[in-house]
Image (cartoon, grey):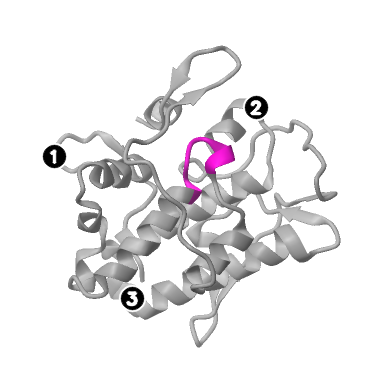
């Protein structure tokens, strides 16, 4: 439905479908993060855990890795769980899942929806593993972010695509402090808040060891 190699197995997701999924997932995460008595951190947000009903309404499934937290409490370190390509860099490094690690995963899903690509894919010619966040951010830095959009969408709705791509990048910011909350994301998607400014150059990471890292460094073990 979303990727080219599976398009013959089901209906094609047009732009309206993809927008609906993005908003539906944002609504679900806003509820989990901000409206439950105890905050719920899902820890495994990915496209295969999004269920669609007959009207293509999105429902988040598989809460097997979810954790309950008191609001405004610091998380404890745990064994890192989840799916490579969707995991926030600080979660991989420290093993602490927060609402912002869910936000990162949501950003990756948004980029998948707009681009029709998996979070980590092998480049056909070079056979190098390509990280979707890095690829989209590179195009954005060159002023060509719309080139990341799924070509099967025939170049329609470019302004809406650009907006959603930038939402995806803001959520997938390597610096967790620069990511929006899911409530803010939902407001942006509903036209109730201004989009967040996204730096043309993807921020690098500096952990307590003092070494600057990029997402390519983090995901190099996938090659």
Image quadrant holding the C terminus, namely top left
Q: Name the N-terminal-most of marks 2 and 3.
A: 3
**Is there a contact, CB below 8 Å, between mark 1 and mark 3?**
no
- Which of the pair 13/201 is nearer the observer? 201
- 61 vs 125, left or right, is right
Give percent across and percent down for residue 58. 55, 74
Q: Is residue 40 visible?
A: yes
Residue bearing mark 2 = 94
Reply above or below: 91 against 46. Answer: above
> Is 176 in the magenta?
yes
- Which of the pair 220/24 is nearer the observer? 24
Reply above or below: 28 against 43. Answer: below
Q: Residues within 10 Å of mark 3 (few under 14, many from 20)?
A: some
Q: Residues within 10 Å of mark 1 (few under 14, many from 20)?
A: few
Q: Residue at x 22, y 41 (%)?
A: 123
Q: Which residues are magenta?
A: 171-178
Q: Residue at x 59, y 60 (%)?
A: 184
Q: Name the N-terminal-most of marks 1 and 3.
A: 3
Residue bearing mark 1 = 125
Give percent across and percent down for residue 96. 69, 34
Q: Residue at x 46, y 42 (%)?
A: 85
Q: Residue furthest left?
A: 125
Q: Secondary structure at mark 3?
A: helix
- Which of the pair 222/186 is nearer the observer? 186
- 185 vs 158, left or right, is right
Query: How far apart are labels 2 and 3 at the CA level?
Result: 37 Å
> Is 161 in the magenta?
no
Q: Is residue 13 visible?
A: no
Residue bearing mark 3 = 15
Q: Secondary structure at mark 2?
A: helix
* Quarter residue 11 falls in: bottom left
Q: Secondary structure at mark 1?
A: loop
């Amino acid at each position: 439905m979303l990727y080219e190699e599976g398009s013959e197995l089901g209906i094609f997701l047009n732009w309206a479908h993809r927008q609906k999924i993005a908003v539906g997932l944002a609504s679900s995460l806003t509820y989990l993060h901000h409206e439950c008595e105890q905050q719920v951190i899902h820890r495994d947000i990915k496209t295969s855990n999004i269920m669609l009903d007959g009207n293509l309404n999105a429902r988040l499934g598989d809460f097997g890795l979810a954790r309950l937290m008191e609001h405004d409490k610091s998380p404890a370190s745990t064994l890192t769980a989840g799916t490579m390509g969707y995991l926030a860099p600080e979660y991989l490094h420290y093993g602490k899942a927060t609402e912002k690690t869910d936000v990162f995963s949501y950003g990756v899903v948004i980029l998948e929806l707009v681009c029709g690509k998996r979070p980590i894919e092998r480049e056909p010619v070079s056979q190098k593993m390509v990280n979707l966040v890095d690829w989209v951010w590179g195009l954005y830095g060159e002023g060509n972010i719309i080139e990341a959009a799924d070509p099967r969408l025939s170049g329609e709705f470019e302004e809406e695509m650009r907006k959603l791509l930038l939402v995806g990048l803001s959520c997938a910011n390597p610096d967790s402090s620069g990511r929006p909350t899911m409530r803010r994301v939902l407001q942006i998607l509903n036209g109730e808040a201004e989009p967040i400014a996204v730096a043309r150059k993807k921020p690098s990471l500096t952990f307590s060891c003092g070494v600057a890292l990029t997402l390519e460094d983090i995901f190099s073990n996938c090659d």
